[in-house]
Amino acid sequence: MVAAENLTLHRYECTNDSYTLDLGDGVSLTLMLIPAGEFMMGSADDDEDANKSERPQHSVQLTQFLMGATPVTQAQWRVVAGYDPVDESVEMMADPSRYKGANWPVEHVSWYQADEFCQRLSKRTSKHFHLPSEAQWEYACRAGTETNYHFGSQLTAELAVYESSDGPVSVGSYPPNRWGLCDMHGNVWEWCASYWYDNYEGAPTDGSAWIEGRDTDLRVVRGGSWFSDLEDCRSAHRHRLALDFADIPLGFRVICSPPRSF
């Protein structure tokens, strides 16, 4: 770990718009408007912290979208789990998390359950909610930065929870990035819509989810968790898990269509 006095760390003032959706039962969901733009996805060849799955680094162009300001909380999950089902084969327990707290991130949820959450929310609100593509997730996490973390080249315990055995923390406990997104590093792993590929050869360049060209039950997870190593929390780090796997701190955040639908 690099000593804190040797780090250049950045804290940002949020400059983009936010939108609030009433879920019912006194619970709301805050969405941040992520601006359109272009970024270099993945890790450069000379990045010693990177692994082969993060290459080749490539340019991706994205249109604007809305993204949850935090991972979905247990309170938000509980409300939406009570909505009418879309896929009745997917069980939505009201309280799946191992560590209990209304404002803590929901965890121990599978990709199927995260996707069903989005579908139920879409059906209830007539808006298009879904899991982020891997490109959307990394673009939003970086928020215009090119360093290993959106705070700079390293993290400290003042900026995120990682390498901890004490469990999660309430969402928003740490400073957001410049686009108002909290907990992009650590706290809980976050499911993405994209299939797992071993590298970025042939990856889409328009920000869409990479779901063509193979038959796999593996999906991408991003961001690391409270017990992850520092390197696993990097903006470019990617990992894969099976669709039905839920037995670790797995959470998610939602994506929604642009604000003209609000």
Image (cartoon, rainbow, N blue to C red):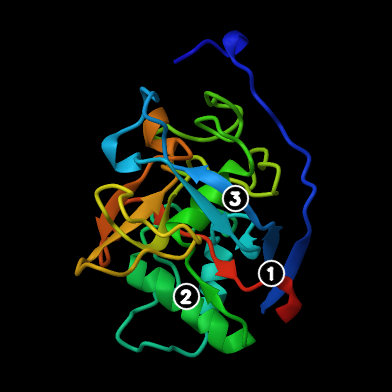
Q: Compared to 70, does 117 lie above or below?
A: below
Q: How far apart are marks 2 and 1 (CA)?
A: 15 Å
Amino acid on which the number 1 mark rests in the picture: Ser
Q: How crowded is mark 3: few (under 14 residues within 10 Å), some or many (20 or more)?
A: some
**Residue 38, disc:** 3
- Asked whether the residues under the numbered discs 3 and 2 touch, taking CB atoms below 8 Å apart as contact, a structural biologist would say no
**Residue 28, disc:** 1
Residue under the image location 62 percent in, 88 percent down: 126
Figure disc tally: 3
x and y percent of residue 145 in the render?
Answer: 61, 36
**Residue 91 visible in this rendered orientation of the protein:** yes
Residue under the image location 56 percent in, 33 percent down: 146
Per the image, label 1 sits on a secondary structure element best described as strand
Classify the position of the N terminus by image quarter. top left
The quadrant in which residue 90 appears is bottom left
Per the image, label 2 sits on a secondary structure element best described as helix
**Residue 229, disc:** none
Q: Residues within 10 Å of mark 1 (few under 14, many from 20)?
A: some
x and y percent of residue 218 in the render?
Answer: 25, 61
Instruction: State the residue position of label 2.
Output: 117
Q: Distance between the residues labelled 3 and 1?
A: 31 Å
